[in-house]
Image (tube, rainbow, N blue to C red):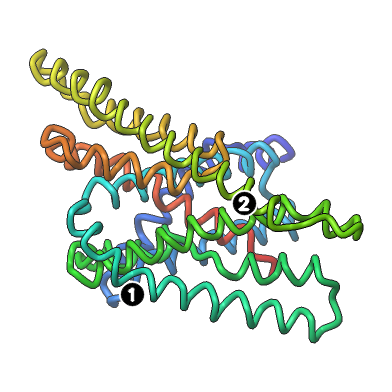
Amino acid sequence: MNEIVGSVSTPDLLVGALLVLAILLKAGFERIGAPSLIAFLFLGIAVGHLEGELGLVSEPGVAVLEFLASLGLIVLLFRVGLDSNLHGLVSKLGAAFPIWIGNVVLSGAPGFLVAQWLGYGLIPCLFVGTALTATSLAVSVNVWLEAGVLKSPTGELLTDVAGLDDLSGIVLMGLLLAVIPALRSGDGTPLVPVLVAAGAAFLLKFVLFVAFCLVVARYAERPLTAWLGAAGSPDTSLLITGLGIIVAALAAGVGLSLAIGALLAGLLFSRDPAAVRSESGFMPIYEFFAPFFFIGIGMSVDL
């Protein structure tokens, strides 16, 4: 009996069961016109309950699901970038800026004030306000992606706003972490030079990373896809996906985020016709990994 119970919690069986359930739930939710991510979130909440309250999910199983959730985030945002119109996104930036500023101010300021009203100190209040300024680019665009309207003018505007929200969340958190030592010391250290130095470092890092992505897109992705196409290889979509994962992982490694890195990679690769043509081959990869991102979010919910 113990052997049977132990085998149920193995990662391979868990992943297979969740994949089957995700496919069935997605089909059911699509029939009633509801976004599939809701089904995946509920599935993740159930797994989290089984793991936390009942102990029926092993630690290796949780680790595997967290890994798959990271890959799910990458392939989801990579597909959004690959399927986007870069010129359309750029043209909507002017309209996106005031919306983005409103999002940051109208979410961060009330969060800070409510935390202050509840009696927290300055530093916890700053963390609360900063955390509430960020959105989830993947969650925001997934519903629009499934509805087929992400390429519409409003969909492009949404992508710009969500992307700016993600970037500003990273920048604000970085600036906050930079000034925390000065705030804790209380010795009157000027904060402006610290903020300017941290902001300039992030800007330089972001510019260098975009330049790196351009180099990868031009001197690695395009020659490799052309070579595979000439050789008649069907693995172009796998190559594109692998390069996207590398770019996203490097983005997280230099202090950006998986989401921003994956989106940037997709946007840059979208300029290559061969990469766009490989999108149909990319879809099975997307359908496999994307649900695990939302399952991972659900698992983090503490009922």
Q: 138 or 269, which lies in front?
A: 269
Residue denoted by label 1 = 34
Please state the horizontal and vertical placement of residue 231, each as a whole percent of the image.
11, 13
Q: Amino acid at mark 2?
A: Val
Please state the horizontal and vertical placement of residue 96, each as a whole percent of the image.
33, 69
The residue that appears at 20% across and 67% down in the rendered structure is: 149
**Circles 2 and 1: CB distance less than 8 Å?**
no
Answer with the quarter of the image where residue 213 lies. top left
The residue that appears at 61% across and 42% down in the rendered structure is: 8
The residue that appears at 69% across and 51% down in the rendered structure is: 193
Q: 107 or 302, which lies in front?
A: 107
Secondary structure category for the residue under label 1: loop
Please state the horizontal and vertical placement of residue 237, each as a whole percent of the image.
23, 31
Foreground mark, 2 or 1, reads 2
Please state the horizontal and vertical placement of residue 268, each as a whole percent of the image.
26, 40
Secondary structure category for the residue under label 2: helix
The quadrant in which the N terminus is found is top right
On screen, residue 268 versus residue 107, left or right, reads: left
Residue denoted by label 2 = 196
Q: 216 or 44, which lies in front?
A: 216
Q: Amino acid at mark 1?
A: Ala
